[in-house]
Image: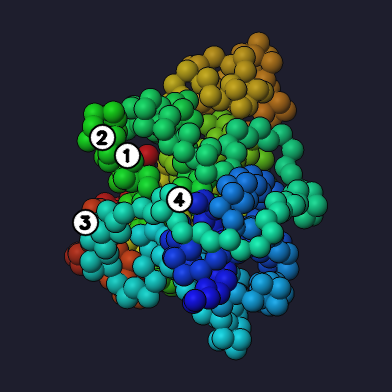
Amino acid sequence: MMVHRLQGVWLKRDLRLNDHAALWEASQVGPVIAFYIIEPEVIEAADFDAVHWEFIADSLREMAEKLAPLNVELRIARGEAVESLRQLHSEFNFEAIWAHQETGLSHTFARDIRVRKWCRSVGVCLHELPQNGVIRGLKDRDGWARAWEKFMGESCQPVSEFKFQATCRIALPTIPTAEALGLKTQEGRSIDLRGGESQGHRMLRSFIEERGHRYHREMSSPLTAYRSCSRLSPYIAWGNLSMRSIVQAVRRAAGEGGMPKVAARSFLSRCHWHCHFMQKLESEPAIESRAFNPACDDLRADGNDTARLQAWQAGQTGYPFVDACMRALKARAWINFRMRAMLVSFAAYHLWLDFRVFRDWLARQFIDYEPGIHVSQIQMQSGLTGINTLRIYNPTKQGRDHDAEGNFIRRWVPELSQVAAADIHEPWKMPDMVQIQCACRIGDDYPHPIVDHLESVRFARAKFSELRRSEDYWNHSEAVLHKHGSRKGGVRNKRPKKSKTKNDRQTQLHLNEKSE
């Protein structure tokens, strides 16, 4: 009789059972032991927060409960990855480790190199499998979209088809609290997104069956986005649901008439872009700490004004809609994409802050923090790619467009709760008597604008106009486009045509900018 040796499954950002390639493949070979490693390098990193661990802990508890009846123990280890694997191997003597590929930052990249080296040294086979549309080792974007479609169309492996075999005594693990790990929970948070595969499926069903039917119309305003957006992002980021299963469920619902096709198309395009942006970090890990376009790397060399940074973080910039969005994000650990883009745009263009100054702090605010998307989007919204249109958001216009009556502002900036809709987007313009009547004195109860919008935009445009006169900038932009640019077309930052006059050249440069 053939004896099947134990298979180890290393869980990371894939905390689910359904459509879990590593679990499925390992179960076809032999009995399985699953493990999750709490790594000091990860939980003590500047981009990690208690809100992340609490979501992970919820997910691990549910996984352990679902794996136990299948004769699979989930072991929680704590320590450096190689040392933890060495101890697990000495206890269980697994012959192989199965895991999903992870698109992370430099510390997880270095960790994976150490793990591969250790596996070779002890004769443990390491199998790393893709779990979304990100392709490891990709040279450029030719054919990427077709590969994404192919992957999304392949069959998901349901738990019912797993061939788990008896392993050993099954015991539910003890999951440490955030406090036990030394992680401080931020005050004032009220989060209704709980981790776990079951929670993810409930969120997906409610989105398909009801909440998402006006997604295409209501995803931009924070007044409607909290209900009409899918809010599946944390379940994707921590792997409670696979991207493939979500794509297939939404396509099925649209085809059967359960979800409006226009809403489904809008959502599915964002599923595609999710992997598109992760691919950027996968293909070029250096963008974690340097600009996509190297010519932009020193653009904001002096962009570390502590007072400006702290005012932005506290929601005290004097721009009500910006402050409301920031405070809502900090309280809920989630806000819709357009408002995220506006917050980063304000930090980058109005406050002229370098992305490295606020990157990690902002990561800690997002319950759905995904390094590939986070780094790529912050750089894009800061104008550092050289291939995307500059999007400079007018914070007052955004407020009027997406919160015309000021209801969202009043909820999150109570200092302005008595201010009329006509004044709430520019309260600094209220006459003194009106400020007294509203119980909001600008400069005392609520700050004056930290910067002047028009002056800040003129300054930012002048900096970029100067940068774009460099051939080095355009040469790097072409290289970025070749390696990272979408092959589906769209608006890109174009090299200006040579003009006879300086004014003509400046006009051409500004065609590639957009104020919103």
- Give the amino acid type for the residue marked by disc 1 in the picture: Val
Marks 4 and 3 sit apart, C-alpha to C-alpha, by: 39 Å
Q: Position of residue 267 (x, y in %)?
A: 33, 40
Badge 1 or badge 4: first in the primary sequence:
4
- Depth-wise, is mark 1 or mark 4 nearer the camera? 4
Q: Residue furthest bottom?
A: 121
* In the depicted structure, whether residue 485 falls above or below residue 324: below
Return the residue found at the far front. 1
Residue 107 coordinates in the image, percent (x, y): 61, 71
Image-quadrant location for residue 476: bottom left
Mark 4, secondary structure of its residue: helix
- Residue 213 against residue 308 in the figure, above or below: above
Q: Earlier in the sequence, mark 4 or mark 2?
A: 4
Residue 77 lies left or right of residue 147; in this view the side is right
Residue named by callout 3: 489
Q: Nearer the viewer, residue 254 or 324?
A: 254
The residue drawn where x is 50% and y is 51% is 17
Q: Are marks 1 and 4 in contact (CB under 8 Å)?
A: no
Residue at the (73%, 64%) spot, across then down: 78
Is label 4 or label 3 in front? 4
Local crowd size for mark 3, using a 10 Å CA cut-off: few (<14), some (14–19), many (≥20): few
